[in-house]
C-alpha cells in the first residue's frame, strides 16, 4: 500500500515538474536574428495594375529578428536550416490592401507569412534591415504593341511575316516609342520550323526584371525567311590538275590532256573560308587513270572520263559547291619507253 502511494506521489511530482518547465518555456520569450531573406511580389489579381519595389520584383532583407518561445525559435531555426527557401517570402498586395504607391513596414509584410504565424512567432518591428520598403503602384493602359521576334540570346531576328503585326496589351502609360514592343522568344527549333512552315506563338512583355512575363491574349502567326546563303559565286584561281594512277600503271604512261583549259575553268559557290581552303589544296582537280584505260591507250584512242573535284574535307555543300556540271576530260595515254640497263 505504501509503495503505491509513493509511486503516485512520484508521478505527481514528475507531472508538476514537466508542467512547470512547459509553463516556463511558454512564459519565457526570446528573440533570434535571421539573415538574407527575400521578399517577392506576387502577381496582383488586378490586371490593370503593376505593383513593384521601385520597378523590381523582389527585395533583399539583410536581417530580421523572430520573437517567440525558446522551443518555437529552435524549431524555426531547424526548419530554415533544412529548407533555406523558407526565407523566401511573398508579398501579396491584396493582403495589405495596396491601391496606391507608398511605403510599408517590412515587419508587417513578414508577419503575413503563413509559416511564421503557424509557429506562433512574430517579427520584431525595429529589427528589420531595411525597416521599410517603397511600393510603386502604376496604372496600366491598353496600347497597340509592335510584335518583334528574338532568339534565346535576346537578339532581334527579322521575320519574313508576322500576322497580326501588332497586339493590344496593358502597359505603363510612360512606355513610348521603342518600348512599345511585344516580344516573341523563338528557340532554335522554332526558328528552323518557321523557315519551312507558319508557326503560332504568344507575344509577351516583362514589366520588371525578374518578374514573370505577361502574355498577350492574342497569338500571332510567324514565318521566318530561308536561311541566308553565305556562299558566293567564285572562280577558282590557278587550279592544278593531278593524276591518280592505279598501282599497275604507275611510271608506265604519260597523260596528254586535250581540253586542259576547260578543266581548269572552275566555277563554285563557296564561303570565303571554303574557297581559301580549296585553293590551298595541292590538286583542285584529279583525273583517275585505271587498268581499264589501257586497251584504249594501246589503240591510240582518245579517252573520256569525268574529273574529280578535290574539295577540302570538313566542308559540306552548304559551304562549297560546284556551279556547273562536272567537266569530261579528253586525254590520251602515252607509253613511256622502257630503259634497258
Image (tube, helix red, strand yellow):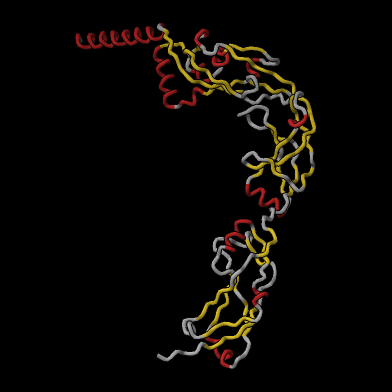
Asked if residue 114 lies left or right of residue 45, the reply is: left
Task: Count how many numbered circles sit on residues in the image.
Answer: 0
- Looking at the picture, tell me which residue is in the foreground, 141 or 192: 192
Q: How far across and down, in percent of the image, does residue 290 sit?
A: 53, 83
Residue most extreme to the left: 2
Q: In screen coordinates, is 41 left or right of 162?
A: left
> Percent from the top left, x then y, of residue 177?
77, 30
Name the residue at 59% across, 90% down: 296
Q: Toward which corner of the image does residue 213 lie, by quadrant?
A: top right
- Residue 66 coordinates in the image, percent (x, y): 47, 13
- 164 vs 17, nearest the viewer: 164
Q: Which residue lies furthest to the bottom in this view?
A: 299
Query: Is residue 190 placed above or below 214 in the rendered structure?
Result: below
Task: Report x, y in % for residue 53.
Answer: 63, 19
Which picture quadrant has residue 111?
top right
Eyeballing the image, is 99 above or below 158?
Answer: above
Report the residue at 55% width, 61% height from top.
314
Q: Is residue 149 above or below residue 265?
A: above
The residue under the point 56% across, 69% down is 283
- Quadrant the N terminus occupies: top left
| Relative depth, front residue between 122 and 168 | 168
The quarter holding residue 243 reads bottom right
Quadrant placement of the C terminus: bottom left
User: Is 162 left, or right, of 186 in this rendering?
Assistant: right
Amino acid at each position: 500500500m505504501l509503495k503505491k502511494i509513493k509511486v503516485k506521489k512520484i508521478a505527481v511530482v514528475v507531472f508538476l515538474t514537466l508542467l512547470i518547465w512547459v509553463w516556463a518555456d511558454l512564459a519565457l520569450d526570446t528573440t533570434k536574428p535571421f539573415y538574407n531573406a527575400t521578399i517577392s511580389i506576387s502577381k496582383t489579381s488586378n490586371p490593370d495594375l503593376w505593383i513593384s519595389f521601385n520597378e523590381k520584383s523582389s527585395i533583399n532583407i539583410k536581417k530580421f529578428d523572430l520573437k517567440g518561445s525558446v522551443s518555437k525559435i529552435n524549431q524555426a531555426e531547424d526548419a530554415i536550416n533544412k529548407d533555406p527557401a523558407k526565407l523566401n517570402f511573398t508579398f501579396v498586395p491584396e493582403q495589405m490592401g495596396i491601391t496606391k504607391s507608398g511605403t510599408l513596414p517590412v515587419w508587417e509584410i513578414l508577419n503575413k507569412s503563413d509559416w511564421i504565424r503557424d509557429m506562433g512567432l512574430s517579427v520584431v518591428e525595429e529589427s528589420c534591415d531595411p525597416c521599410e520598403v517603397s511600393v510603386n503602384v502604376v496604372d496600366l493602359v491598353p496600347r497597340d504593341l509592335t510584335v518583334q521576334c528574338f532568339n534565346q540570346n535576346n537578339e532581334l531576328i527579322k521575320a519574313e511575316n508576322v500576322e497580326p503585326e501588332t497586339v493590344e496589351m496593358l502597359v505603363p502609360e510612360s512606355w513610348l516609342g521603342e518600348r512599345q514592343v511585344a516580344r516573341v522568344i523563338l528557340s532554335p527549333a522554332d526558328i528552323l520550323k518557321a523557315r519551312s512552315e507558319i508557326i503560332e506563338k504568344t507575344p509577351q512583355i516583362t514589366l520588371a526584371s525578374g518578374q514573370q512575363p505577361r502574355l498577350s491574349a492574342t497569338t500571332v502567326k510567324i514565318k521566318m525567311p530561308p536561311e541566308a546563303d553565305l556562299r558566293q559565286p567564285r572562280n577558282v584561281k590557278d587550279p592544278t590538275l593531278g593524276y591518280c594512277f592505279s598501282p599497275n600503271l604507275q611510271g608506265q604512261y604519260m597523260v596528254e590532256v586535250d581540253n586542259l583549259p576547260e578543266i581548269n575553268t572552275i566555277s563554285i559557290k563557296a564561303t570565303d573560308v571554303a574557297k581559301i581552303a580549296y585553293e590551298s589544296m595541292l590538286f583542285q582537280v584529279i583525273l583517275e587513270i585505271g587498268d581499264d584505260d589501257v586497251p584504249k591507250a594501246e589503240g591510240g584512242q582518245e579517252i573520256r572520263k569525268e574529273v574529280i573535284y578535290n574539295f577540302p574535307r570538313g566542308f559540306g555543300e552548304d559551304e562549297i559547291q560546284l556551279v556547273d556540271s562536272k567537266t569530261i576530260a579528253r586525254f590520251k595515254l602515252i607509253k613511256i619507253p622502257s630503259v634497258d640497263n
